[in-house]
Image (cartoon, rainbow, N blue to C red):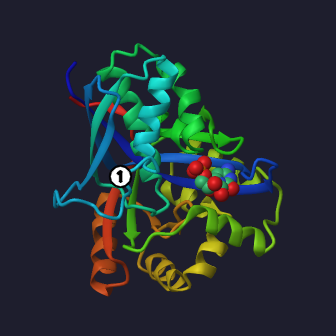
Amino acid sequence: MLPVTVRAPAKINLVLEVGAGRPDGFHALSTVYHAVSLYDEVTATPHDDAVLAVRVLDADSLRERTDVPRDESNLAIRAADRLRSHLGRPELGADLLIHKGIPVAGGMAGGSADAAATLVACNEAWQGGLSRAELEPIAAELGSDVPFLLHGSTAVGTGRGEQIAPVLARGHFHWVLATFAEGMSTPEVYEEHDRLGGRSGTFGEATQHVLEALRDGDPEVLGGALVNDLADAALALRPELAGVLALGLEAGAVGGLVSGSGPTLAFLVRDEIAADDLAEILRGAEVADVVLTAAGPRPGAKVVR
Ligand code: C5P
């Protein structure tokens, strides 16, 4: 059995409409996921001693990341464990090496990307033989965003976000991402959203506007349609984000929003040159820890070696 490396992208929610709380503790969502060119890579080295282990390195510096758990609370370990249970092969083990390029606890689904990449890598490395369609329900058990990160590209998410349908999208979009070293807890942001009184407006309407903008393909139209129902909650918990969002919009972005449950801020710009320009302005203003540029859509979890 040989090592397998899989790359999975980060996501931005172009629209995130949060509906009612459900009996299972999740919220009904209507969202449009968009995969962008920031990646985590997972290399699975298989063995048959039933041991699952994970190491996480920063993709740029190759330094060990101490802010990511190495026990069963790591979503990559849980993904490998679920997969071997599903295959009925409890004796399978693997060393998982993650090269992390996606911000941790940043609202860009880095943990979910690792889970999606691990499912694909271990399925190959263990010769599990499951199809993408067969991996999808395992992905949904691991987290609401994980099925999308298998799928990639641009897709509508409903249910709690795990039910994915592809969308007709034209064009490529360029993004500037203002990222922050201190992450945010997704459950806390949802709790704050509930405390603030939930949402107003017709559920699903903002999603329709984004789908129309995607058919059009014009970044200015899409920029005007971006909506995140979790933004007020994220800004209430991290008030300093509001000024950064305003700065990005004043400095030439055609749209901007909190990514998922935050704190990453995603700015949509007209083209690649505009992305470099805005990134320089935000870096110069020293308002974020790291400013990155990215483009989408990009494919989902994919074997690279
Ligand atoms: O599914 P995932 O593990 O990403 O969810 C993390 C947490 O985010 C959940 O435990 C829940 O508190 C919140 N969540 C939610 N409704 C969703 C998705 C996530 O309330 N649709």
Q: Quadrant of the N terminus?
A: top left
Q: Residue at x 29, y 26 (%)?
A: 49
The residue closer to the viewer here, 38 or 118, is: 118
Q: Is residue 257 left or right of residue 4?
A: right
- Compared across the picture, whether 274 is left or right of 248 comes to left
Q: Is mark 1 within 8 Å of ligand 1?
A: no
Residue at the spot 30% in from the left edge and 63% down from the top edge: 66
Would you place residue 180 above or below residue 296 in this image? below
Where residue 77 sits, quadrant-wise, is top left
Please indicate, yes or no, whether residue 230 appears anywhere in the rendered image. no
Residue count near mark 1 (Cα–Cα under 10 Å), binned few <14, some 14–19, many ≥20: some
- Horizontally, is 59 left or right of 270 in the view? left
Considering only vertical position in the picture, is 255 above or below 218?
Answer: below
Q: Is residue 288 visible?
A: yes
Q: Which residue type does callout 1 highlight? A: Arg
| Rendered residue at 63%/81% (across/down) | 236
Nearest the camera: 74 or 253? 74
User: Where residue 33 sits in the image (x, y, percent)?
Assistant: 55, 46
State which quadrant residue 239 falls in: bottom right
Could you tell me how many numbered marks the image carries?
Answer: 1
Seen at 39% across and 16% down, the residue is 128
Residue 230, image x, y percentages = 65, 66
Up-down relation of residue 112 to residue 163 (above or below)? below
Could you say where residue 43 lies in the image, as x and y percent from the top left?
Answer: 25, 36
Work out which quarter of the rendered image holds the C terminus and state it: top left
Relative image position of residue 296 (x, y in whole percent): 40, 47
- Secondary structure under tag 1 reads loop
Residue bearing mark 1: 70
